[in-house]
Image: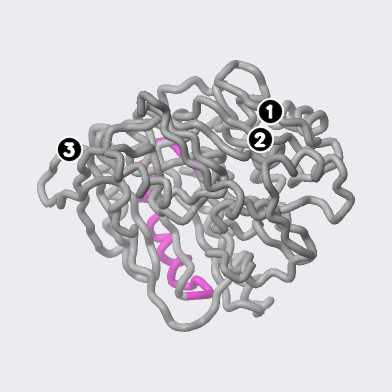
Amino acid sequence: MSDLFNLQSADAAIAGVISPKAEDLPSLLQAWSGPRPLRVCSGGTSSRCAVDGCWSLDLRPGFQDLTLSPDRTTVRVGAGRTMGSLLEVLAAEGLTITAGLSGHPGMGYVLTGGMGPLSRRRGLAIDQLSEVRGVWGNGRCFALQPSDQPEWRALCGAAPFLAIVTDVTLACLPLTPLWVARRSGPPEQLGEWIAEAESWPDVQSLQWCWRGSEVQGLQVSLEPFEGGVPIAGQHQLPSLASSPVDGNRRHGEVVGLLGPAAAAGWGRLVPDLTRLMRRSPDGFCSLSAQQLGGATARVPVDASAFRHRDAVWKPWITAVWSAGDSEARERSLAWLEEVWALLQTVCPGVHLAQLHDHLPFHQRELELAFGPWLSELRLLKARLDPAGNLPQL
């Protein structure tokens, strides 16, 4: 699977790859006797979609379906599609969905929450779901619609532990222009940026990326604002920050956090964060964030497995190292945990956008992501995936 976007997965010495059809999945899971857990690839951006010694289910070849409803209010999309390809097809129809900052992720983006620059106005991607179809880890097929049943709530935020989702139905939105503006500055300005953004109406959002000695920001709005440049829609969204290239092949891990409005707290942390950023073990390590709130907070906490409805900021820490350098890997992961520890005062929650069942902090992530509902998720896991065909909870 050398074509994967995530280089760590692309370089993995996997046991093998299966590109199943939908009708093959039930019998495959029921009879599976190979190494567990199975790894699932949709967009190929996760560091765990292909793993040394494991089998990968590559959904990209067989799950590319895309069907608009007759009234053009929903779209059924196969789990092998990237969000970018979906946005492009919909844009040609004058439509869009609530999408993220990058077009590379696949169905994992939706099923783990789905945050983007329009979330403050439109909600999370899981809030747009009207049906999810797939196969539980035990091989039983399902097709579920929104309800207060634990199976539905679990699919909306914790699906990768329980099921292989084959397709989902999402709400469509009319394609409308957006206005965007880039900014950059020293880290000392970050507290001011966050305070400013926390005062904005929910038609606007701020995303930022801190790498080295500079913070780059991207302001996105559904309405015109001073300095904003119009684009046709999310399918034309510029990248959050420039990506320097030095020719080295890098692996990495990403941890996502969640926290409430806390501009003053962020401002107090900037000096310590600056020291940590200055001594990051690789110049490509970074700290980024995107703004939530608004519509994301107006959904009941118990409607999904995404428990942090009070979150206004989702920072994510990216630790990278030169491929094959185990000592550099240890240094970068230690740095990641230092940054995480510092940020816990303002962002105590976790967003499980990527799985880390190979790292020592996996259980802590689960507890901080799902809170008291983790015990119920584990009961569902025992019933729906008793053999552990999918990653552990």
Local SS, label 3:
loop
Mark 1 nearby-residue class (10 Å; few <14, some 14–19, many ≥20): some
Q: Which residue is mark 2?
A: 134
Which residue occupies the extreme left position in the image?
Answer: 226
Cα distance in 3D space between marks 1 and 3:
40 Å
Which residue occupies the extreme bottom position in the image?
Answer: 247
Disc assigned to residue 287: none
Q: Which residue is mark 1?
A: 142
Q: Give the mark, 1 or 3, whose residue is nearer the N terminus.
A: 1
Q: Is residue 261 visible?
A: no
Q: Could you tell me what secondary structure mostly forms the magenta stretch?
A: helix
Residue 352 sits in quarter: top right
Q: Which residue is mark 3?
A: 223
Residue 121 position, x and y percent, is: 31, 31
Q: Which residue occupies the foreground of this view, 93 or 355?
A: 93
- Left or right side of 270 for 358: right
Q: Give the mark, 2 or 3, whose residue is nearer the N terminus.
A: 2
